[in-house]
Image: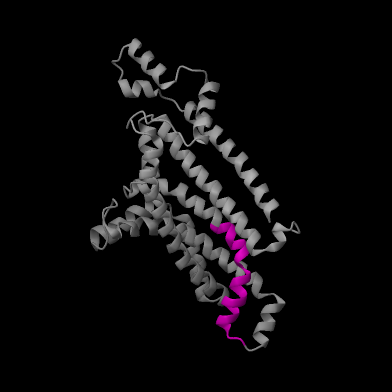
């Protein structure tokens, strides 16, 4: 197990280094000059050059890259050009909101998808099955930027059940979580159905039924329990996608998370904050995939023993 863990950890290190390098160069290739945004078009050339030197933007790109990578290794993401605060502090103040939204959306997706997928597998070919797969198709097809305003219009403006936007009230997270979790629920329900149908054709399922177990016990204790391995892949990938997909949802609902901070920083050409936001989302994705790999090895010992 230790060798498997070390190999996955080493792979995660190289992925993080590649992501860090890619984030640095992509941000610097974006058109626009942060010095001009900060000082305005009327600033003199001397002031621009002085600010460019103070920010280190006049150094060679390779030296800027090394400074950025070494800073990331030391958890020093520099200072925001607009807010004049450490980027790490800005991320810390916004990241909690993004994690809260992703966690609630994940919970909504699981509560919808697992019962729906089990019901569709147990009633294969019936109206329940067709309805569940229709929901799956609709959930994948409807984008967040359309579903979000629709939820606001229906449940906030017409019915008045939930706040329109922001994070001031406890119920503020409900609508953005539903908008973000619907697509995951659609994908997960289809995966639960297909994995469960594959397991239900195995010999041990027929043995369980021959022993007189109820259909519920067969589905949950034997079927769903053995269908978890492919589901872990989807859950791990989609949990990372929730953090990335939260950018659109946060803008629609004015949710004060990393996504909103990222869009605002792009508009202001605040390079350090943009780099920090993209890096935080990317590293979260890598960390979630690392945890998923370790869960794989815990659920199926053949993986950590190298027999698959």
Question: Picture quarter containing residue 180?
Answer: bottom left
Picture mark count = 0
Which percent across, then down, holds residue 18?
59, 36
Q: Nearer the viewer, residue 222 or 4?
A: 4
| Highlighted magenta segment, given as a residue range | 213-235
Which percent across, then down, holds residue 85?
34, 33
As for residue 42 lying within the magenta part, the answer is: no
Which percent across, then down, holds residue 186?
49, 61
Looking at the rendering, in which quadrant would you find the N terminus?
bottom right
Q: Is 299 left, or right, of 105 in this rendering?
A: right
Magenta-highlighted stretch: main secondary structure? helix
Residue lying furthest right? 307
Residue 307 visible to an observer of this rendering: yes
- Tell me what residue is drawn at x 44 percent, y 37 percent: 276
As for residue 231 lying within the magenta part, the answer is: yes
Q: Is residue 248 above or below residue 203?
A: above
Q: Nearer the viewer, residue 102 or 250?
A: 102
Which percent across, then down, holds residue 138?
46, 60
Q: Is residue 64 above or below residue 172?
A: above
Residue 124 visible to an observer of this rendering: no
Q: Is 248 left, or right, of 190 in this rendering?
A: left
- Tell me what residue is drawn at x 58 percent, y 83 percent: 215
- Tell me what residue is drawn at x 35 percent, y 53 percent: 148
Looking at the rendering, in which quadrant would you find the C terminus?
bottom right
- Tell me what residue is drawn at x 47 percent, y 37 percent: 75
Question: Picture quarter containing residue 123?
Answer: bottom right
């Amino acid at each position: 197990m230790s060798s498997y863990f070390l190999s996955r950890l080493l792979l995660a290190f190289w992925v993080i280094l590649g992501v860090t390098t890619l984030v640095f160069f992509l941000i610097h290739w974006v058109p626009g000059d942060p010095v001009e945004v900060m000082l305005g078009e009327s600033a003199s050339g001397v002031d621009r050059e002085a600010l460019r030197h103070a920010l280190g933007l006049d150094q060679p790109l390779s030296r800027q890259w090394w400074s950025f990578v070494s800073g990331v290794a030391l958890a020093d993401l520099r200072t925001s050009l607009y807010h004049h605060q450490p980027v790490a502090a800005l991320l810390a103040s916004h990241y909690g909101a993004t994690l809260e939204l992703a966690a609630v959306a994940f919970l909504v997706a699981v509560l919808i998808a697992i019962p729906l997928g089990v019901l569709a597998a147990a009633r294969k070919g019936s109206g329940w099955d067709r309805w569940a797969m229709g929901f799956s198709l609709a959930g994948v097809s409807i984008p967040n930027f359309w579903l979000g305003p629709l939820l606001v219009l229906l449940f906030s403006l017409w019915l008045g059940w939930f706040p329109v936007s922001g994070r001031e009230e406890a119920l503020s997270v409900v609508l953005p979580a539903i908008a973000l979790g619907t697509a995951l629920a659609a994908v997960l329900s289809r995966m639960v159905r297909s994995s469960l149908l594959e397991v239900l054709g195995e010999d041990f399922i027929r043995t369980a039924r021959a022993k007189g177990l109820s259909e519920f016990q067969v589905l949950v204790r034997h079927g769903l329990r053995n269908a978890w391995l492919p589901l872990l892949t989807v859950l791990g990938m989609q949990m990372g996608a929730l953090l990335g997909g939260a950018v659109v949802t946060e803008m629609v609902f004015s949710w004060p998370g990393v996504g909103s901070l990222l869009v605002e920083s792009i508009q202001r050409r605040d390079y350090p904050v943009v780099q920090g936001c993209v890096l935080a989302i990317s590293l979260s994705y890598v960390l979630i995939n690392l945890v998923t790999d370790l869960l794989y090895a815990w659920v199926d010992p053949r993986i950590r023993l190298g027999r698959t």
